[in-house]
Image (spheres, rainbow, N blue to C red):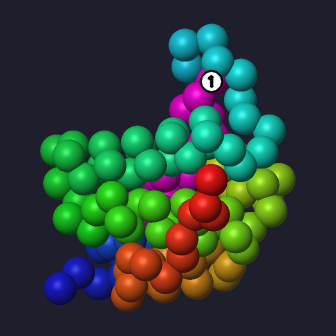
């Protein structure tokens, strides 16, 4: 089993995801999201799933885990803080804030720990 800091761990996945979640939408002329919403959700989950299918083959990045991470971040971290974490991680990856680590750890234990709100 991977340690929490190994390349395939949920914490490592979360670090990568912050780099693609918000700013990934700026590609192709799209505007950077200003709140949690469909664009941020799609970017986040797409980036998470790409980690699973990339050469890294991150097994922990299941669709359920990716969805849990996004739902947990959405529920516990205000978007402005989420965006700041993303910007900081894009410049220089560093340990995640305690709030984010709690979400990552909860989703690693149970991918149903957080759910998206019903539409």
Is there any visible trace of residue 7 in the rendered image? no
Residue bearing mark 1: 26
**Which residue is depicted at the point 62% across and 24% down?**
26
Secondary structure predominantly adopted by residues drawn in magenta = helix
Task: Find residue 112 and report its horizontal and vertical position in percent.
Answer: 43, 78
* Residue 43 inside the magenta-drawn segment: no
| The residue positioned farthest toward the front in the image shown | 119
Indicate left or right for 90 with 44 as reference: right
Q: Is residue 69 visible?
A: yes
Tell me where the magenta segment starts and ends, as one range.
12-26
In x, y percent, where is residue 106?
A: 48, 85
Q: Report the label total.
A: 1
Who's the residue at 49% across and 52% down the image?
Answer: 17
- Residue 32 locus on image (x, y percent): 71, 29
In this rendering, is residue 26 above or below 38?
Answer: above
**Mark 1 burial class by Cα count in 10 Å: few <14, some 14-19, many 20+:** few
Residue 117: percent from left, percent from top: 63, 63
Up/down of 91 relative to 16, above or below: above
- Element type at marker 1? helix
Tell me the residue at 17%/85% (across/down).
1
Q: Is residue 23 above or below residue 68?
A: above
Q: Quadrant of residue 63?
A: bottom left
Residue pictured at 61% horizontal, 40% vertical: 38
Residue extending farthest top: 29
């Amino acid at each position: 089993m991977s340690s929490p800091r190994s390349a395939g761990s949920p914490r490592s996945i979360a670090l990568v995801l912050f780099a693609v979640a918000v700013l990934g939408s700026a590609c192709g002329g799209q505007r950077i999201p200003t709140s949690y919403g469909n664009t941020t959700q799609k970017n986040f989950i797409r980036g998470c799933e790409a980690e699973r299918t990339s050469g890294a083959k991150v097994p922990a990045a299941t669709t359920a885990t990716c969805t849990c991470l996004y739902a947990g971040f959405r529920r516990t971290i205000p978007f402005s803080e989420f965006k700041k974490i993303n910007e900081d991680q894009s410049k220089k990856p560093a340990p995640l804030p305690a709030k984010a680590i709690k979400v990552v750890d909860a989703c690693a234990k149970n991918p149903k720990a957080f759910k998206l709100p019903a539409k």
